Image (cartoon, rainbow, N blue to C red):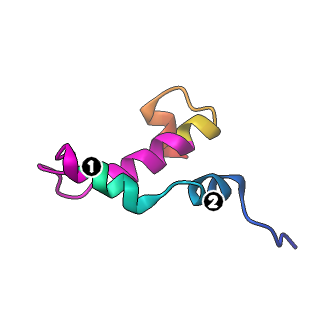
Amino acid sequence: MFQDKYVFVQLVSFLNRSRFNRIVSKYKGDKYVKHFSCWIQLLVLMFGQLSNRESLRSLIVA
């Protein structure tokens, strides 16, 4: 059985979320956001890069 962390979780652990949130609030990145925050968008785009997706449609299917 798999006991270790996945590669995606290991990469996300390197990110400093509080610093990211300060930058987002400085530039008002979440000003008109209702559901899809900048943090979630960053995670989705990172997942798309790691899984070698070529379009948003294939990313949604994943």
Looking at this rendering, what residue extends furthest in the right direction? 1
Q: Residues within 10 Å of mark 2 (few under 14, many from 20)?
A: few
Looking at this rendering, what residue extends furthest in the left direction? 32
What residue would you read off at disc 2? 9
- Which of the pair 41/28 is nearer the observer? 28
Q: Distance between the residues labelled 1 and 2?
A: 22 Å
**Secondary structure under the numbered disc 2 in the rendered image:** helix
Residue shown at 52%/54% (left/top)?
A: 15
Q: Residues within 10 Å of mark 1 (few under 14, many from 20)?
A: some
Disc 1 residue type (three-letter): Val
**Secondary structure under the numbered disc 1 in the rendered image:** helix
Q: Does the stretch in magenta take in 42?
A: yes
Q: Where is residue 49 in the image (x, y as percent from the top left)?
A: 57, 35
- Would residue 37 be seen by someone viewing this image from the given angle? no
Q: What stretch is highlighted in magenta?
A: 25-47
Compared across the picture, whether 14 is left or right of 59 comes to: right
What residue would you read off at disc 1? 24
User: Looking at the image, is mark 1 or mark 2 nearer the viewer?
Assistant: 1
Residue 52 position by quadrant: top right
Compared across the picture, whether 34 is left or right of 51 comes to: left
